[in-house]
Amino acid sequence: MNPNLLRSHPIMLMICIAVFSICFGPCPASAAPLQISAEAAVLMDAKTGQVLYEKQMNKKLPPASTTKILTALIALESGRLDDMVRVSAKAAATAGSSLHLFPGQMLTLKELVSGFLLRSGNDGAVAIAEHLAGSEDAFVAMMNQKAAALGASNSRFVNPHGLHNPNHLSTAFDLAWIARYALSNPLFAEIVGTKETSIEWLDRRGRSQEGNVRNTNRLLWMLEEADGVKTGTTSQAGPCLVSSATRGNQKLIAVVLHDHARWQDSMHLLKYGFDNFELYEYAETGTVFTALPVESGMNNMVDAVVDGVAALAVGAADYDHVTVELDLPEKIKAPVYQGQKIGEIIFYIQDKAVKTVDLIAASGVEELTVDKILFRNMMHLMRRLAGWGLL
């Protein structure tokens, strides 16, 4: 697989890491006592996608307004943030938490996303859906397609805001996974980490107006390291929270669903993660690790590229016992295909292999055959003759 394709399509990379997380589950250190009152919860390392703690993380539950993480993500990736959005009567009449939009109001998509994420405005979610897809139903189809592409396989969305519907369900793991991807978008991360902002709009007479919007996520004030993400509450879902925090080189994501102690539990989860785990970083995705000689190839060398997150969240006591080995041949025989696995990075904890990351070929190398040698020599000759003015 082309590493440039991976870098431009992080969804493919994240699905691979999701498989690792689901297969290997929580780290052994997660067995330490941790009392969480949520019906479902998960703590995830944002860099690696590793689950550090879980409680019924795959149980399907109503996600309330944490749904808006996916709605905002689709809007931010639309490439239409400068669009002027006209609020419909239907959007303005949406029940529940509100930005107090009115029919005919005009504001940019970027302003609308900022306002509805911070204030959790259901009217803003419908306005976004209608503008980008023409209808709520069409936008919901986009949501489910995006969730599936990200690997959030236990989620089904039926609206863009999270108002209760018995068929509108997600899981703690899926919400953490979606948030992890969303936080890789710099604008999303900036918005959800903002405590308060102002948004501008045009009133019915076309005059510019401005108003302040305060984030509903109280954790931003309660925990110094907190930097996101989204609250949610309905009578059926109960209080929910997807939160994130960063300390040093480590970002963690916590999700609690149906939790009447969501602020305290989220703080406990995040502090537990920082106190008990450390991030061992080795190489970034897409890094050219080395050049490997190619035998009998049209090119003599091919770059070996890191095809995944070469990092590991480990128990603090194990950090000094992490070692890394490379499994690479001295050379590789042509033909070589772009994206072909040509080696591995292997992580060990006290001599036990715990994770592997593939090294892949950055480009293809054709086999050097007699016909290709003759063709190459002929092309060299023609270029020389042309340079001498003989062609």
Image: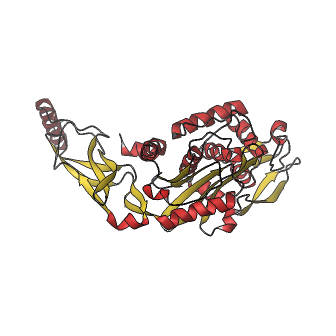
Q: Position of residue 131 (x, y in %)?
A: 72, 38
Horizontal relation, residue 346 to residue 374: left or right: right
Q: Position of residue 48 (x, y in %)?
A: 45, 53
The quarter holding residue 289 reads bottom left
Horizontal relation, residue 376 to residue 234: left or right: left
- Count of numbered labels shown in the rendering: 0
Q: Nearer the viewer, residue 111 or 148?
A: 148
- Residue projecting furthest to the right: 205
Q: Position of residue 133 (x, y in %)?
A: 68, 34
Does residue 193 appear in the picture of this structure?
no
Does residue 375 appear in the picture of this structure?
yes
Residue 317 higher or lower than 69, as above or below? below
Residue 22 higher or lower than 44, as above or below? above
Looking at the rendered image, the quarter that the N terminus falls into is top left
Q: Residue at x 73, y 59 (%)?
A: 215
Horizontal relation, residue 26 to residue 134: left or right: left
Q: Nearer the viewer, residue 41 or 106?
A: 41
- Residue projecting furthest to the front: 33
Q: Nearer the viewer, residue 33 or 89?
A: 33
How are the residues colored? secondary structure
Looking at the rendered image, the quarter that the C terminus falls into is top left
Q: Residue at x 82, y 55 (%)?
A: 208
Q: Position of residue 351 (x, y in %)?
A: 27, 58
Q: Nearer the viewer, residue 364 or 12?
A: 12
